[in-house]
Image: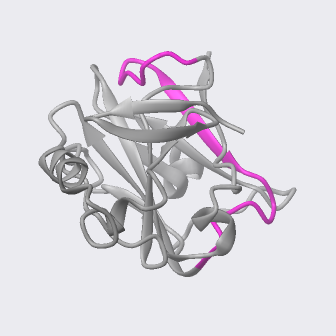
């Protein structure tokens, strides 16, 4: 399963280094008396959708549990058939330590299921390259630029997610550091 973790006072479930929000986050204060938790989440920039509308899963660490840092290169590999199960769309957005989008030479701030030109690997998987410099012209279609240095994080957003995401049984792939 995953362990519980607290971020901004809101309990999260850790799965492969990604933080799933509490399943009832979008309902706090509506069906419960959890207005304080909802306010803390909103103050931290968390949009509180009902899980049936959208789930935002965030990553701050790599597969070794180390903070993501722009001086490193990473990959995120979705196995064949392993893309986020959604009824609408998904996106992976890059944020710097200041919680703003990362300025980069190709003006790409997210990769989504509708990003034109994304390449599928020979085995049917999709590898995304997370690094500050180009991974090479042949891989740029799958490149999501990171800051040149310092901490960053990513939000994997699932809009009208499938039951696996709502129930938190879908496991996002790990973010692997490339040596």
Residue 79 vertical position relative to residue 68 in the rendered view, above or below: below
- Residue 138 image position (x, y, % from top left): 59, 51
Magenta span: predominant SS is loop
Within the magenta stretch, is there residue 75?
yes
- Residue 116 image position (x, y, % from top left): 49, 74
Q: Which of 63/55 is in front?
A: 55
The part of the image, by quadrant, that contains residue 62 is top right
Q: Which of 124/26 is in front?
A: 26
The image shows a total of numbered marks equal to 0
- Residue 81 image position (x, y, % from top left): 79, 66
Name the residue at the front extreme. Answer: 33
- Residue 83 image position (x, y, % from top left): 67, 63
Q: Is residue 24 left or right of residue 122?
A: left
Residue 106 in sight here: yes
Residues drawn in magenta: 65-86
Within the magenta stretch, is there residue 145?
no
The C terminus - image quarter: top right
Report the residue at 28% width, 20% height from top: 149
Q: Which of 116/151 is in front?
A: 151
The part of the image, by quadrant, that contains residue 164 is bottom right
The N terminus - image quarter: top right
């Amino acid at each position: 399963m995953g362990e519980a973790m607290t971020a901004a006072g809101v309990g999260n479930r850790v799965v492969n280094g990604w933080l799933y929000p509490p399943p009832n986050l979008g309902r706090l204060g509506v069906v419960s008396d959890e207005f304080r938790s909802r306010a803390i989440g909103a103050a931290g920039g968390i949009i509180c959708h009902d899980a049936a509308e959208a789930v935002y899963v965030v990553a701050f660490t790599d597969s070794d549990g180390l903070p993501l840092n722009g001086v490193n290169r990473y990959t995120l590999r979705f196995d064949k058939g392993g893309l986020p199960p959604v009824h609408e769309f998904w996106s992976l957005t890059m944020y710097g330590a200041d919680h703003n989008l990362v300025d980069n030479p190709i003006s790409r701030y997210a990769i989504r299921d509708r990003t034109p030109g994304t390449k599928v690997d020979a085995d049917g998987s999709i590898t995304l390259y997370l690094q500050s410099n180009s991974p090479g012209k042949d891989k740029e279609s799958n490149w999501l630029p990171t800051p040149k240095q310092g901490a960053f994080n990513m939000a994997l957003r699932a809009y009208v997610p499938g039951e696996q995401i709502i129930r938190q049984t879908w496991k996002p792939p790990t973010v692997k550091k490339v040596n």
